[in-house]
Amino acid sequence: MKRFILPVLFVAVFAVSRIPRLLPPDFSAIYALAFCAGIYFRGAMAWWLPLAIMAGTDLGLNVFYWHVNPLRPELLLNYAIYAALIGAGKWMGKGAALWKLLMGGIVGAALFYVLTNTLSWLTDPGYAKTIGGWIQALFIGLPGYPPALDFFRNTLLSGGLFTALFVGAARATEESPAEKTAGAVETDDEGTAEEAGPG
């Protein structure tokens, strides 16, 4: 039963975090979801679950709320980064120290921010195609919009906070050594009973 709790919790938290205007801009659970899915989910679920949930919510929000093209080419970069975060989680593994997992979530979020803002710098005519323009895209933004540094702060904070939440939930729902031993003993007892059979 416990193995189903974690995916349900991760998906529920992420779904709530996607409600428009509920959280500050760029304060998202997706960075932590992708990273922690790689750490804690087994097999193909680590890949398809976070990517499918993200694709489904992207599609719904873009079509019915934001009213923009749901198949924009720049979204490919987003999903490539999510896949990289899943891979990083698998590489790190759940046996890593807590501080390493937290740093992994924060660094992953920072990587997402830098790469997506770099793409904005390359494609948005409002930015000069110079080092100064790139720095503007990362830390200042365009006139008439909130400072880009606010988005960077929210990205880092949400990466750390949601990673801590997901890691804490994962460790709280893990089987204790006593539970694992009890399960092994129960399995052994059942096997012995079947071997003995009716006399």
Image: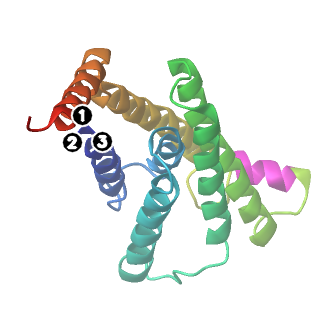
Residue 60: x and y, percent? 38, 76
Q: CA distance from mark 3 to mark 2?
A: 5 Å
Q: Earlier in the sequence, mark 1 or mark 3?
A: 3
Residue 148 at least partly seen: no
Q: Which residue is located at x 50 percent, y 32 percent?
A: 160
Residue 137 magenta-drawn?
yes
Report helix, strand or loop for mark 2: loop
Q: 10 Å neighbourhood of mark 2: few (<14), some, or many (≥20)?
A: few
Color scheme of the displayed model: rainbow
Is the C-beta separation of discs 1 and 2 under 8 Å? no
Residue 49: x and y, percent? 43, 59
Q: Which residue is located at x 91 percent, y 57 percent?
A: 130
User: Is residue 45 or residue 57 the one in the foreground?
Assistant: 45
The residue carrying mark 3 is 3
The residue carrying mark 1 is 191
For the magenta stretch, what is the residue range?
Answer: 132-139
User: Is residue 109 or residue 199 the one in the foreground?
Assistant: 199
The residue carrying mark 2 is 1
* Disc number lying in front (1 or 3): 1
Q: Which residue is located at x 28 percent, y 50 percent?
A: 8
| Magenta: main secondary structure | helix
Quadrant into which the C terminus falls: top left
Residue 106 at least partly seen: yes
Q: 10 Å neighbourhood of mark 3: few (<14), some, or many (≥20)?
A: few
**Residue 179 as seen in the image, left or right of residue 88:** left
Residue 1: x and y, percent? 21, 42
Report helix, strand or loop for mark 3: helix
Q: Please, is residue 122 above or below residue 70 in the view?
A: above
